[in-house]
Image (tube, grey):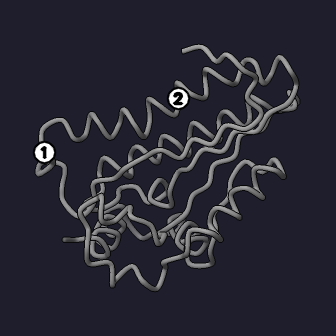
């Protein structure tokens, strides 16, 4: 992939999820399609732009991950959580690689957000997620401000920050999977 015009800002936001069902119940090929969109496209677009940004000494990259990328293992979001864990890791590593170049990479890790995501992902009952739900505008604003400030990570919302902190102290990986899966079971 080649980029014809200079790119000053790259926002990798395209993604979709399959939530509420275990991997063995995915339709054949859905996991591959999700990895293609959530991981491969993001990596290829970043690679296509970053060299020119570094050569020019300026540029901003914002990769949209998810709080699910920190909750591993994540119950009944196997493919989605794993793809977002890649985005978290890739973005944090890239932010280090870019130090001193004039280019920054930020990853935005929102939690449940009021968009069409859950309908598209097949989860129509989001009542259990409602206490954590954020509107899209404040999430986007937080990501934009973090990107412009050159911060490597942005986790908007108190509940999401608390969830991220709790993952460091979770009593067991089995508990993490069970607790996370309870919120999104179909």
Relative to 8, residue 147 above or below:
below
Relative to 155, residue 7 above or below:
above
Label number found at residue 131: none
Left or right of residue 170: residue 79:
left
Picture coordinates of residue 17, whole percent (x, y): 34, 53
The quadrant the C terminus occupies is bottom left
Label number found at residue 43: 2
Relative to 94, residue 183 above or below:
below
Left or right of residue 185: residue 143:
right
From the viewer's side, name the closer residue of 114 and 161: 114
Left or right of residue 24: residue 126:
right
Query: Within 10 angstroms of label 1, few (less than 14), some, or many (20 or more) residues?
Result: few
Count of numbered labels shown in the rendering: 2
The quadrant the N terminus occupies is top right
Earlier in the chain: of badge 1 and badge 2, it is 1
Picture coordinates of residue 150, whole percent (x, y): 81, 47
Q: Label 1: which residue?
A: 27
Residue occupying image coordinates x 76% and y 39%: 60
Picture coordinates of residue 93, whole percent (x, y): 65, 35
Q: CA distance from mark 1 to mark 2?
A: 25 Å
For numbered disc 1, what is the local secondary structure?
Answer: loop
Q: Toward which corner of the image does residue 158 lie, by quadrant?
A: bottom right
For numbered disc 2, what is the local secondary structure?
Answer: helix
Picture coordinates of residue 169, whole percent (x, y): 52, 69
């Amino acid at each position: 992939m080649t980029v014809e015009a200079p790119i000053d800002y790259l926002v990798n936001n395209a993604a979709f999820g399959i939530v509420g069902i275990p991997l063995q119940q995915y339709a054949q090929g859905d996991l591959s399609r999700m990895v293609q969109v959530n991981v491969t496209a993001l990596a290829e677009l970043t690679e296509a732009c970053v060299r020119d940004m570094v050569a020019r000494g300026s540029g901003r990259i914002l990769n949209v991950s998810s709080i699910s990328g920190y909750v591993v293992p994540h119950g009944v979001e196997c493919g989605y959580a794993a793809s977002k864990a890649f985005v978290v890791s890739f973005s944090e590593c890239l932010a280090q690689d870019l130090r001193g170049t004039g280019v920054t990479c930020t990853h935005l890790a929102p939690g449940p957000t009021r968009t069409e995501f859950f309908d598209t992902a097949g989860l129509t009952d989001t009542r259990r997620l409602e206490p954590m739900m954020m509107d899209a505008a404040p999430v986007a604003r937080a990501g934009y401000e973090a990107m412009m400030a050159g911060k490597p990570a942005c986790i908007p919302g108190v509940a999401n920050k608390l969830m991220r902190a709790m993952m460091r102290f979770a009593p067991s990986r089995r508990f993490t999977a069970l607790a996370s899966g309870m919120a999104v079971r179909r």
